[in-house]
Image (spheres, grey):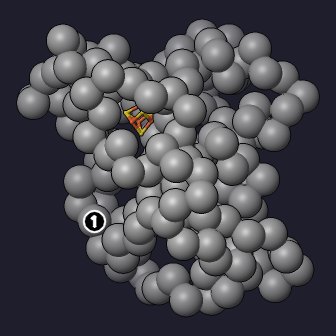
Amino acid sequence: MLEEKTSLNVRLSGIVNESVSDGPGLRTVLFFQGCKHHCPNCHNPQTWDFQGGCEYAVAELLRQLPDTPLIKGVTLSGGDPFFQPLAAIQIAHAFHQRGKDVWAYTGFTWNNLLEKKDTAMYELAKSCDVLVDGPFILAQRCLDLPFRGSTNQRLIWVKESLKQGRIVEWPLSSR
Ligand code: SF4
């Protein structure tokens, strides 16, 4: 299996094994360490430092994460997982192999990532089921939005968006 072949490392600021607020259902959440966006009013500035957090071997991390029917999927959060795209891709593929879905939060916009064709960042975007794009913007904060903090952020249904060549938002009714 993929998770037994990999020798990549990943730097994380934290792991939550059972979250109900970072995507639909019960989810494993990996908070990636390192972010270059430096958004004003960031809630997690401790995740900016690329030398912070803890380093894990991806294969060992995957072995330790719970793999039970109760877990619906994994959410890659941060920080920004797109600054460690190769490790994030391997984690995403491993969860797909387990039959789970993959959500990711990023400070990049969908268009930013589409412009990075032929890069690992673009591959990571394609490896997600849903991408919550763009930084948190305090002036656009909305407490009523499911799974995101500000109105600029979109729940992008990756497969349909690529297929239709336009942004298709993930249907909240499928929660
Ligand atoms: S992308 Fe997220 S973690 Fe990075 S600075 Fe912006 S709000 Fe903070």
List x then y, in percent, for residue 90. 74, 62
List x then y, in percent, for residue 140. 20, 13
81 horizontally vs 53: left or right: right
Task: Please rate how many residues cluster around mark 1, counting C-alpha atoms within 10 Å: few if below 14, some from 14 to 19, many from 20.
Answer: some
Q: Is residue 21 above or below residue 125?
A: below
List x then y, in percent, for residue 120. 81, 40
Q: Is residue 95 above or below residue 111?
A: below
Residue 137 seen by the camera: yes
List x then y, in percent, for residue 88. 67, 55
From the viewer's side, name the closer residue of 40 and 115: 40
115 horizontally vs 110: left or right: right
Which residue occupies 78% across, 21% down?
Answer: 116
Q: Is residue 49 above or below residue 141?
A: below
Which residue occupies 66% across, 65% down?
Answer: 10
Helix, strand or loop at label 1? It is: strand
From the image, tell me which residue sits under label 1. 19
Amino acid beneath label 1 = Ser
Ligand 1 is located in which of the four quadrants?
A: top left
Residue 170 seen by the camera: no
Q: Where on the picture, by quarter, is residue 14? A: bottom left
From the viewer's side, name the closer residue of 122 and 10: 10
78 horizontally vs 24: left or right: right
Which residue occupies 54% across, 72% down?
Answer: 54
